[in-house]
Amino acid sequence: MKLIYANGACSLSVHILLEELDIPHEALRVSLEDKTVLDSYNPRSYVPVLVRDDGTVMTEAISILQYLSTVKGGAFMPEATLDKTKCIEWLVFISSELHKGLGPLFHPDGVKPEFEKEVRAKYDDRLQIIEDELSEGHFLMGHEYTIADMYCLAILRIAEHVKVKFDAFPLTLKYKKNLELRNTIRRVIEKEERAELETRPRSYSQRMTEFRNHERNH
Ligand SMILES: N[C@@H](CCC(=O)N[C@@H](CS)C(=O)NCC(=O)O)C(=O)O
């Protein structure tokens, strides 16, 4: 398997899961500024991208996380139907509210101060939801470490990057720090920071070989 990721991006969640599951993979660090390599893997032009050995290209963090969990017998997902549904609820909340809620703060020209204030206030409301949940246990699913925590950590780190303040959310800050101290997570973060950028776009022949393998397997 091949993971296409960018350092400090939401793709960290998939990278952590691949390592936690001990799935052999190649991790290619791409630039989000010069997207030549990224676009050769994903015309949608964003990470994460997972390329299976048969050439199937997968995008969307939530979908990839659930796929990898499923092929490993439901690892890092609760088993009971209601708990599993709750975990999916967290994944969707993280994707649509926490992650995309940061979008305006990435505007290359900045945003008007009043709008920025509004965005940050709304973001605090969302963080309060995480903070309240963490008063019940160490993880979003109580005492069970799941793919929702891997995803949440990746997004909290992005939030930190755009200067979201965690002072009013001590449990969330502790949660983030504890996750960052886990051996696997620390290793992945260091690996991402140290890796060189991939400079070779996916070639036409590589694409065709993978496509043929994919066709043969279906
Ligand atoms: N819908 C995608 C969005 C992924 C996404 O926003 N990735 C960001 C990094 S965290 C990215 O690659 N941004 C590049 C860009 O939009 O130009 C998902 O949930 O996986």
Image: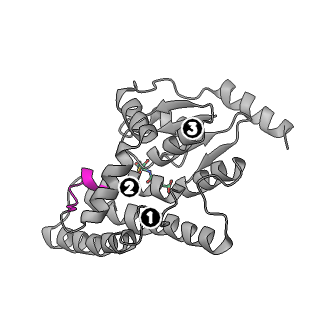
Left or right of residue 197, residue 55 in this image: right
Of callouts 3 and 2, which one flags the residue occurring earlier in the amino acid sequence?
A: 3
Q: What SS does tag 3 mark?
A: helix
Q: Identify whether 157 is placed above or below 21.
A: below
Dot 2 surroundings within 10 Å: few (below 14), some, or many (20 or more)? many
At 79% across and 33% down in the image, what residue appears? 213
Dot 1 surroundings within 10 Å: few (below 14), some, or many (20 or more)? many
At 71% across and 48% down in the image, what residue appears? 71
Q: Which mark is residue 41?
A: 3
Q: Quadrant of the C terminus?
A: top right
Camera-nearest label, 3 or 2: 2
Can residue 186 be seen?
Answer: yes
> Could you say where residue 115 lies in the image, as x and y percent from the top left?
20, 72
Secondary structure mainly formed by the magenta segment: loop
Q: Identify whether 148 is placed above or below 216.
A: below
- The colour scheme applied to this rendered structure is one colour
Of callouts 2 and 1, which one flags the residue occurring earlier in the amino acid sequence?
A: 1
Q: Front-most of 58 and 27?
A: 27
Q: Which mark is residue 155?
A: 2
At 67% across and 72% down in the image, what residue appears? 81
Q: Which mark is residue 94?
A: 1
- What residue range appears in magenta? 159-166
